[in-house]
Amino acid sequence: MHMIFRILMVFLNSKKATRLTMFDTSSVKMRATLTDIDFAGHINNGMYFSIFDLGRFDLMFRSGVWDIMRKNKWTPVVQTETITFRKSVRLGTKFSQETKLLGLDDKCIYFEQRIVVDGEIYARGYIATRMTSKKGAVPNEEILAAVGLDVPEDRVVPEWVHQWREQGALPGSRKPAPHNWLS
C-alpha cells in the first residue's frame, strides 16, 4: 500500500477516537499533500480511491470489525468502484473523507464515500466490497453473524447501484475472461 504512513496514522488515531458501529459515518480529517497531487496541482483522480481506502479502514478500526476480520483471517477487497468529481482539491487544502455503509446484498457490502471541503461535496464515490478468505468469498450472513449486527431497515442500497455493479462486473475468477476488444 503506497499510503502506509497514512494508514498507520489512521490506525493510531482510531485508538483514541470515538467508537463507531459499521452503520455510523466515519470522518477522517486530511490535507492534500505533495504525494496526492498531479501536475495540474490538484489531487490526482486515482488518489481518491486510495483516500477512500483510508476511510473504510477507519470505519473498520473504530467499529472493532478489523479485529474480527484478523481473527477470522478475512481480507477486504474492492469488487467495483466509481467516482464523480465536482471540484478540485488543491495542494494544502484541508478536507474530510466521509464514509457511510449503504447496505448489503447477497454478494457485496456497499459504501458511499465523499471528499468534503468546508461542508461542500467535492467528490463522491460508490464502492462495492467483499470479504475473502483462503476458501473464497465470505458470505455476508457469516460476516454479520461474526460482527453481531443486523442491517438497519433504513440501509437500502439504491437499485441503480445494484445495476451498476452487475452490469460492470467481469466473470468470476474461476471463469474465463478472454481479452477481445469489441469492434
Image (cartoon, helix red, strand yellow):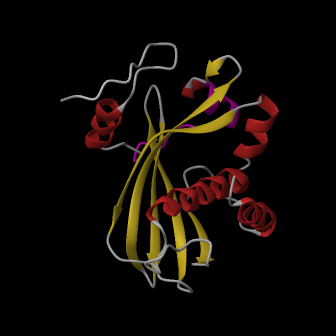
| Residue 11 x %, y % | 77, 60
Q: Is residue 157 magenta?
A: no
- Which residue is outermost to the top? 175
Question: Which of the pair 17/38 is nearer the observer?
Answer: 38
| Quarter holding residue 132 | top right
**Of residues 34 and 121, the one drawn nearer to the viewer in this rendering:** 34
Does residue 93 appear to the left or right of 30 in the view shown?
left
The residue positioned 79% from the left and 37% from the top of the image is 70
Q: Is residue 61 left or right of residue 83?
A: right
For this orientation, the residue located farthest to the left is 183
- Image position of 168 with respect to 38: above or below: above
What residue do we see at 39% from left, 47% from top? 154
Tell me where residue 27 appears, x and y as whole percent: 58, 68
Whole-percent x, y for residue 123 in the image: 39, 67
Is any part of residue 149 visible from this angle? no
**Residue 148 magenta:** yes
Q: Look at the image and give the residue range highlighted in magenta.
A: 142-154
* For residue 4, above or below residue 130: below
Residue at (74, 68) in percent of width and height:
17
Q: Which residue is rendered at x = 81% and y = 33% of the image?
A: 71
Indicate the quadrant containing the C terminus: top left, top right, bottom left or bottom right.
Answer: top left
